Amino acid sequence: MREGWEYKTIENCTSIEYGTRVVQKRDGGTIFPVYGGGGETFRMDRYNREDCLIIARFAMSPRCVRYVAGKFFLNDSGLSVKSKEELEQAYLNYHLLFFNDVIYHLGKGAAQRNLDVKAFRQLVIAIPPKPTQLSIVSELDKLNELIQIKKEQLKDYDALAQSIFYEMFGDPVENEKGWEVKELIETVSPECKISYGIVQPGEHVEDGVSIVRPVDMVSTFISKDGLKKTTKEISNSYSRTILSGKELLVCVRGTTGVVSLVDESLQGANVTRGIAPLLFSENVERWFMYYQVKSSSVRGVISSLTRGIALKQINMSDLRKIRLILPPLSLQQSFAHKIEQIERQKAAVQSTITDLETLLAARMQYWFD
């Protein structure tokens, strides 16, 4: 315990405010995102929170504490915590972010983890004098600002890569440059069956087979880190396998048209229902295909082919017939060379982000542990 610091329970130094129950069918709109136990669920035309830290109350995920910038609506699956006089709100926010894992393990339940609010209220917050609180916030804000600057650089590199694609090949749907056009089924390797995965992950098995789910498709490349695993029996019976580690994965269910790449480390891994792994033939460069499928016009075509009400999905017969441009391989390879140079720059920036995030975590542990 630090000299001059106070130690109070959340119950004694904050006020807890629950979200309000809403449903999309009755309350849905288009303006403000709705949050609860996880990420954005739908949108509404009114809000009840702004620039606020929220904590999952029902259906908790491992990331159960998050800061949401701007105006949004908090439903009854979440709660927010407001500081009292002696406690700076920004300092409290950082303290609770540091407590994420502790709060997650306060969840109870097997099928659905729900927060034990009574235990949450008894968590202890370390409260230094206000000048120290402000100094800590300033230090952590600067680190976060540097991280955000670097993340914006990554976005700029992605935008540059997409602009190079349009400069070299034009719009792939309009095809104003008159490239050869083929259906998707004509561009893949003979050993590739264009179909989505069907393996269901079930319980995580430490020594099982890695599986890729749509939720894992959040970056250009997917690595084994953080992937769930399924049993070998399920994998052998109900699987779509990543054959070579050179595939392009396309999300065909839910947020359709999202694409990611894999590498050799994922050879033999499975994909769940909702993902189609594509292995291209020798005259197709996958970096070229990645940016073609990622383009807004092709994404628009994919979106127009989705079916379903509760959960949008593409029929495989429709996916196979999507028409794509196919310029000469030498031009595709020239584009891939440019992209690989950009990827090396992105890797350097990502390494800096990792170092900064490590430093941020260390400083938060120093102040709050």
Image (tube, grey):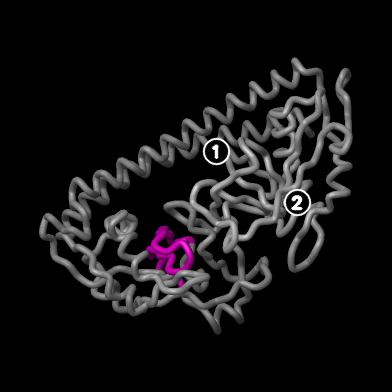
Judge whether 16 appears above or below 251 on screen. above
Q: Quadrant of residue 87?
A: top right
* 262 is within the stretch colored magenta: yes
The residue closer to the viewer here, 232 or 118, is 118
Q: Which residues are magenta?
A: 241-265
Hey, what amino acid is under mark 2? Tyr
Rendering coords of residue 293 (x, y %):
32, 60
Q: Residue furthest top?
A: 131
Q: Quadrant of the C terminus?
A: top right
Q: In the image as oriented, which residue stretches furthest toward the front? A: 26
Tell me which residue sits at (26%, 60%) in the image: 285
Q: Of the residues shown, which amino acid type is indicated by label 1?
A: Thr
Asked whether residue 60 appears in the rendered view, the answer is yes
Q: Earlier in the sequence, mark 2 or mark 1?
A: 2
Q: Secondary structure at mark 2?
A: helix
Q: Is residue 268 visible?
A: no
State which mark lies toward you, 2 or 1: 2
Q: Give the image quarter of residue 185.
A: bottom left
Extreme residue toward the left, this view:
178
Where residue 354 is drawn, which disc sits there? 1
Q: Residue at x 87, y 38 (%)?
A: 11
Vertical position of residue 202 compared to residue 99: above or below: below
Q: Which residue is mark 2?
A: 104
Residue 157: image location, x then y, percent: 36, 40
* Figure quadrant of residue 290: bottom left
Query: From the viewer's perspective, is 60 left or right of 266?
Result: right
Image location (x, y in percent) of residue 123: 85, 41
